[in-house]
């Protein structure tokens, strides 16, 4: 029950109406029976929103598109990992002191490490956007040999330089996948409603490969279906969403996240408990 002692956490972004974050976080609070609640705010002015976190004593916030980079300058402290990425997806309010974190890369790496070891492996990372950068920073910390490929080659080159990746190129170099151990797809291709699309020709998917598609709507993308058919180990995008939220939950509450309850709320929503065709963002 919400009362005068309820701690408030929230999502700040634009748009937010299709986000799954309230569902995942609130499922966790309910499972532990703790007096927290999580709501969404559609925000255009991030400076005012961050002043609001301080002014209202909001305990924690998830930050999403388009504010992940612009939020940084209004915070008091930035965790070193978020600093290396240059973006925050989490703000924690400790008695008015606001610290920014980035749990996206951690979430992705946890999902991947459930399925494969990383050190010394060769990974091909497809994409050059914000998620690609967060994941690339984590992969390099884990000693992965990294090749970044992106439609816009310049962005791949820039990202590779920023994280000290071994190589980069355009999507014309997809044959790199033949000698890779891990393939990570971070573009929006294959996301609802264009679920029949994929960037990767299925003949490049070999049975020594682990394939991670960070797209989570649909829960199993065409890329993952083809990878499974070709004998690859697969990692679902929803696991990244779950684990980045779980890390936020722990930062907000100081409690271990009740993963089964949070996962069940998320997968039920993705499998159609809600109108699964209509959400595409956190
Ligand atoms: N599972 C999770 O927890 C999670 C977390 C964050 C994001 N996501 C999903 O990840 C995807 C990317 O998010 P983001 O925030 O990184 O986006 P972003 O910063 O906008 O980057 C988008 C990337 O997709 C590429 N791209 C877009 N359309 C393409 C096409 N038709 N062909 C080839 N490449 C294309 C872009 O290439 P160019 O550089 O050439 O434009 C860019 O590399 C979204 O689907 C999002 O929902 C999932």
Image (cartoon, rainbow, N blue to C red):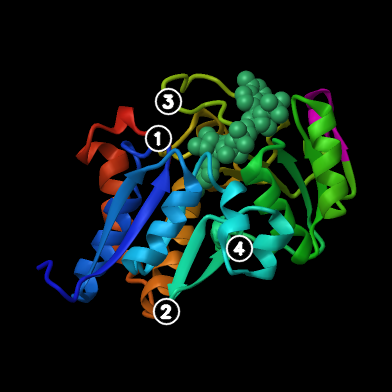
* Residue designated by label 4: 113
* Residue designated by label 3: 192
- Reading the chain from its start, which is encountered first: label 3 or label 1? 1
* Residue designated by label 2: 95
Q: How far separated are the C-alphas under marks 3 and 4?
A: 26 Å
x, y percentage for residue 110? 56, 63
Q: Residue at x 51, y 28 (%)?
A: 222
Provide the residue span drawn in magenta.
168-176
Q: Secondary structure at mark 2?
A: loop
Q: Secondary structure at mark 1?
A: loop
On residue 74, which mark appears? Answer: none
Q: Residue at x 76, y 65 (%)?
A: 141
Q: How far separated are the C-alphas under marks 2 and 3?
A: 41 Å
* Residue designated by label 1: 15
Q: How far separated are the C-alphas under marks 1 and 2?
A: 28 Å
Query: Image quarter for residue 4?
Result: bottom left
Q: Is residue 206 left or right of residue 172?
A: left
Q: Is residue 267 left or right of residue 109?
A: left
Q: Is residue 104 left or right of residue 17?
A: right
Q: Nearer the viewer, mark 4 or mark 2?
A: 2
């Amino acid at each position: 029950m919400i009362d005068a002692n309820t701690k408030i956490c929230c999502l700040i972004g634009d748009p937010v109406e299709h986000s799954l974050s309230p569902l995942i976080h609130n499922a966790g609070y309910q499972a532990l029976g703790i007096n927290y609640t999580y709501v969404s705010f559609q925000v255009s002015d991030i400076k005012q929103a961050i002043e609001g976190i301080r002014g209202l004593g909001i305990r924690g916030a998830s930050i999403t598109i388009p504010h992940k980079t612009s939020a940084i300058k209004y915070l008091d402290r930035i965790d070193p990992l978020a600093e290396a990425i240059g973006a925050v997806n989490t703000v924690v309010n400790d008695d008015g002191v606001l610290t920014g974190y980035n749990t996206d890369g951690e979430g992705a790496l946890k999902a991947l490490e459930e399925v494969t070891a990383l050190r010394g492996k060769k990974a091909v990372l497809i994409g050059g956007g914000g998620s690609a950068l967060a994941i690339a920073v984590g992969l390099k910390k884990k000693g992965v040999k990294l090749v970044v490929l992106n439609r816009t080659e310049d962005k791949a080159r820039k990202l590779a330089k920023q994280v000290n990746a071994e190589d980069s190129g355009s999507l014309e170099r997809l044959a790199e996948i033949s000698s890779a151990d891990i393939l990570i797809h971070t573009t929006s291709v294959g996301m609802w409603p264009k679920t029949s699309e994929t960037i990767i020709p299925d003949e490049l998917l070999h049975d020594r490969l682990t394939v991670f598609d960070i797209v989570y709507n649909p829960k199993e993308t065409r890329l993952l279906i083809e990878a499974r058919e070709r004998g690859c180990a697969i990692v679902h995008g929803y696991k990244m969403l779950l684990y980045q939220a779980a890390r936020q939950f722990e930062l907000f509450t100081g409690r271990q996240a009740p993963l089964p309850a949070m996962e069940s709320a998320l997968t039920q929503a993705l499998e159609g408990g809600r109108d699964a065709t209509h959400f595409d963002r956190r």
